[in-house]
Amino acid sequence: MTALRKNKQTTHEIELAGQLALLDLTGALYLPAHDALLVADLHFEKGSSFARRGMMLPPYDTRETLMALSDAVVRFGPKTVVALGDSFHDIGGPDRLGDDERATLAEVQAGRDWIWVTGNHDRILPDSIGGQVVDEMALGSLTLRHEPAHGEQAEIAGHLHPVGKVVMRGRATRRRCFLTDGRRCVMPALGAYAGGLNACDAAFKPLFPDGFTAHLIGTERIFAIARAMLCRD
Amino acid sequence: MSHAPASLLPKIFRDWFRHRGWTPREHQLDLLAKAREGRSVLLVAPTGAGKTLAGFLPSLVELAGREPSRGTAKDRRGLHTLYISPLKALATDIARNLEAPVQEMGLPIRIETRTGDTPSHKRARQIERPPDILLTTPEQLALLLAHAEAREFFKDLRRVVLDELHSLVTSKRGDLLSLGLARLVAIAPQATAVGLSATVREPDDLRRYLVPQRSPSRSEGGAERGELADLVVVQGGAQPDIRMLEIDERLPLAGHTASLSMPAIYDLIRAHKTTLVFVNTRLQAEYTFQELWKLNDDNLAIALHHGSLDVSQRRRVEEAMAAGKLKAVVCTATLDLGIDWGDVDLVVNVGAPKGASRIMQRIGRSNHRMDEPSEAYLVPANRFEILECRAALDAVHEAAQDTPDARIGALDVLCQHILGMACAEPFKLDGLYEEVRSAAPYAGLTWEDFEACVAFVATGGYALRAYERFAKIVKGKDDLWRVRDAKVAQQYRLNVGTIVESSMIKVRLGKSARSRPGTVLPRGRILGEIEEYFAETLTPGDTFLFAGEVLRFEGISEDEVLVTRAGAGTDPMIPSYEGGKFPLSTFLAARVRQILADPFEWDRLPAQMTEWLLQQRRRSLLPGPRDLLVETFPRGNRFYMTCFPFEGRLAHQTLGMLLTRRLERAKLKPLGFVANDYGIAVYASGDIAGRAARDPAFMDDLFSEDMLGDDLEDWLAESSLMKRTFRQCAVIAGLIERRFPGEKKTGRQVTISTDLVYDVLRKHEPDHVLLRAARADAATGLLDVRRLGMMLERIRGRIIHKPLDRVSPLSVSVMLEIGRERVYSDNADEILAEAEAALLDEALA
């Protein structure tokens, strides 16, 4: 991450299932009522996963993702941290974690309740990475899970890596974003190499039958953008 | 030069020439003599000089004299002659032309082509039983050289013919080809090379390219010239009859459509047999075609040809052209390369010529009878283009050339080549290093850079050595590097080549659904394809010109753009000018500044131009040839600053980006800028002139060369142009796999975005070989940083600031680009803030 500039406005308030939620410039979400910080789709060790197949991506993605994660944890100092699945890019990911990264992770975890929700990329997580492993969990009236369910229940999920694309007078930008209708929230992927799925994709439609607002992560702050302003890729 | 006797030709050839009513030309015999002496040679000749036959004659003569191969495994003979052309269509065309003499003389020579379209069984057979002459492209050569049988296949090679060499050497394809040539020479030292080229500024660059460079040729002081191939020059036939099209109407101050000149162009077409109308961009081609048809009361056969049209449509135009059925073709550079266009007797170039050599090649190319003068018209579309046309005409009359400098071999291309060489056979590091350096573009390659490229190919070459166990090439105990397994070799074959197309998307004509009015179904035919980024900026209902008609954008369905025909008389809404690919050459730019500065030159300009320049001198001033004029003036509630460096739009875009950053820091609140080939206009809500009045050093500081330091670095971090440049390097070097056109994107992207990779790499390893490759590209490519640097140096201490009350005649021309051109900004937050405000407006409405 670039050094925080003075005029950066790192958080952005929204209301989710009747409670305050702070959306963070890193892509994390903080729930003050529960003193819990949520992150989604970290995809640790995606670089090394590609390297196995002959695409030698710079081996710094885990480090970079950890820096963003640690930045958010330090600023909010939450009691609980929940990673909403796909924290590792594949099952072998935890084993490939470098020594430095392992140490940084332990540092960030120290003194907090750390919960790994499993995802489709990391159905199995070894004890060696610390914390507690769950399939899904409840936080008050909110359900936290990896893949959003289509039910009526209020939930926060990841999995889809939403990005929003905006075109204004011929200038386009494509940014990671939070999607929410006030009841459900799909979080952006935090992983440095995690790609994105356009918010206009059909996959989002059944989740938000009455539409959504996209909160796009800019350079200095987060912007609330109407669904109608978003473009396809 | 002593002339070779005709006796060099065997009787059967002399008879054939006589039978055809031809005499062998001097340069054809010269090349024959050179081949006998075992010399490589560069042939510089105008089109129509029999260049291709000259290139092949030595091979035909040699092959004619040898016993035909019985084709059995036992007396298997390798390839004799390899011909490389930049276009596969050209290879096919040449093959056809060569068959004629071979058949007429009954020579036992097998000629075959090998392109991307060659079926796999034929490819396999070609390796088994090589033809005598193989015609192919640089990419196919790379593939052949990476083949395990390469040594066997090329061992008997005698001759390499490189066609259109002047065009090949200016790009990364030329780098790739130079490395292939180095390997060919290593396999077959007896082979000689002949390069066929149009006239260029520095023939020595091409002569070096053709032969192995033995010593590090870039010694201090640059005294060493390196090894040179011999040179044969055919003096250009008749002086071209080329002039500027002058019309009575006043040309506009900006714009590129040349709409006022259309009736004159139409009259010229009518008065000639066959006319080629060249334009700079696809969209200009569309517009010109439309306008000519509006005037076409005589129903002349006028066709359209550009690279985005559907292939079958293009082929139809080409065939009709060759058959002499067309009166005129409106075309872009896709028709630039030397395919035989039949009987063209007039070339019209609409818009700015951009470069003297470019325009000469274009004009020469269409005239296939070298002893008759080519007739050509340059058609300026606006007043600045009058200056540019004047400068180009002067250059043509002096036969001055402005072809680009020789390239320094790109590192991403070298990475690709190294993997290919490992696929062919195990290699030793120092052996390959020496071989690579024998290629002229890589003659100055350092050992460190070479090692970095090898390390990149093996494991990505990162300081953090995390991928040793996944290495793609591995060094054995015998010090030989080998490719890890067949899968890696397969990966190489899929990624070979240096052309990374910008993603294209198909345009399909839709039909309105009868049952559901307002719904458009994708039932019509494919019209061609457009760049994805252009499609991305369209919203439903937008109209634009494509494939000769006005289309209405309906939406994107799956991976196609869906359009309907707009009603008759609809004007296209989307600006129809995409910036030309080529910026104004440095050479022409200097001449334009010279003309501007010297009133004695104005006599040679049309009267409307002189009037305009006089007005500029009265209201502001005309800068000296080395000065930079900066004008400031208020307008509405904004403050404008214009300047005229004449360095081409790419360099101007970069300058604009950096100036707005600096104005931002000076708290002058810049709002945006527009750029064209001649100048830029920046607008701000802060009073720039006021600041300059208070601080006399302000302008000098604003334009100081240190903007190429931290400011440039900061901008590069987020520049979309830089990311595009990086992506191309990443694909060429083999970091990520190529996305093939037509491959559907899956719902969730399985590929990795190079933008993300760029961000991470830039931060953690800013000196990585791929970033260095991307920066080298940025110096000359989309960002043209080097040219900007030269400009800033030129104008140091020579900035003339002219505060004005209102816009000057010169500035109007750039100001008119506002609204027509895109406003540049890479600042995501600005775009987002605007979109967010739209939400608020909606809420309050």
Image: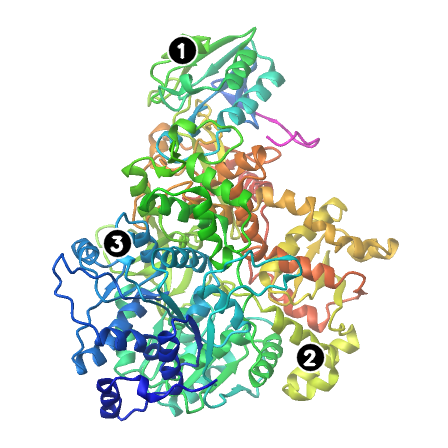
**SS at circle 3:** helix
Disc 3 marks a residue whose amino acid type is Glu
The answer to which image quadrant residue B138 occupies is: bottom left
Residue B2 at what x, y percent from top left? 45, 86
Type of residue at label 1? Met
Q: Residue at x 49, y 40 (%)?
A: B755
The image's mark for residue A137 is 1
- The quadrant of the rendering that contains the C terminus of chain B is top right
Left or right: where does residue A176 sit relative to residue B125?
A: right
Out of B437 and B651, give the one closest to the viewer: B437
Which chain letter matches label 2? B
Mark 1 Cα shell of 10 Å, populated few (<14), some (14-19), many (≥20) = some
Q: Main secondary structure of the magenta part?
A: loop
Q: Is residue A155 visible?
A: no
Establish if B373 lies above or below B490. Answer: below
Q: Residue at x 43, y 28 (%)?
A: B468
Query: Which label belongs to residue A97?
Result: none
Q: Which of the two discs, 3 and 2, sits closer to the camera? A: 3
Eye-nearest disc, 1 or 2: 2
Q: Chain of mark 3?
A: B
Residue B595, disc: 2
- Which residue corresponds to mark 3? B152
The Cα atoms of the two marked residues, 1 and 2, are separated by 76 Å
Where disc 1 sits, the SS reads strand
Look at the image and say whether residue A159 sits in the magenta stretch.
Answer: no
Secondary structure of residue under mark 2: helix
Q: Which percent across, then down, holds residue B680? A: 66, 62
Q: Residue at x 61, y 59 (%)?
A: B651
Q: Residue type at mark 2? A: Ile
Q: Could you confirm whether marks 3 and 1 are on the same chain?
A: no
Which residues lie in the magenta part? Answer: A1-13
- Marks 3 and 2, the one that precedes in the sequence: 3
